[in-house]
Image: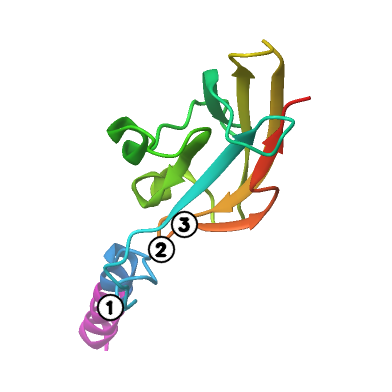
Amino acid sequence: MIKKTAWLLLIALGALSCKKNKTKNDCLDKMCTYEYRSVVFRFMDNKGEGAEVKDFSVINQRTGEKVMANARTSGNSVKGAFVVVGDENIRSLSEQGDNLKITGTSVQTNQTKSAVIKVSGGECACHIDKLSGPDQIAFD
């Protein structure tokens, strides 16, 4: 009887340890597309034209870290438009969404303006998703 109990206990522990060692990752079966998503933000002058900006930055307010989108390094072809976050930043964003503070200073007026947008990502997300916030901000 003791041998039988010991075997049952050993089998039960083995089964439990198998479950315990599995990674708890619900996104293994998730199907994602190959599209690339990014969020573009524009700085406008008081006439509604794209404004030249200096000291541009994006800060994740949850972590305090600067957000760098790789697409931005290729240069911006539209005056005043910046890629603030892209799919390459997905793992540094939370699933609930993080507030990103976008700041820039007008080259013409030296005025600094900021806006906050909320963008989600996360470990299991396929793409980033802009949840709220403006698409542009105008200098006076």
**Disc with the residue nearer the chain's start (1 vs 3):** 1
Quadrant that contains the C terminus: top right
Instruction: Label 3, secondary structure: give it.
Output: loop
Image: magenta residue range: 1-14
Residue that numbered label 3 is attached to: 128
Q: How many marks?
A: 3
Measured as percent of width and height from the top left, residue 99 is found at 65, 41
**Which residue position holds label 1?**
15
Residue named by callout 2: 124
Identity of the amino acid at label 2?
A: Cys
Mark 2 nearby-residue class (10 Å; few <14, some 14–19, many ≥20): some
Q: Mark 1 or mark 2, which is nearer the start of the sequence?
A: 1
Q: Residue visible at 48% across and 37% down?
A: 82
Residue type, mark 3 in image: Ile
In this view, the residue in front, 110 or 90, is 110
SS at badge 1 = helix
- x, y (%) of residue 96? 61, 56
Tell whether position 27 is magenta.
no
- Indicate whether 33 appears above or below 119: below
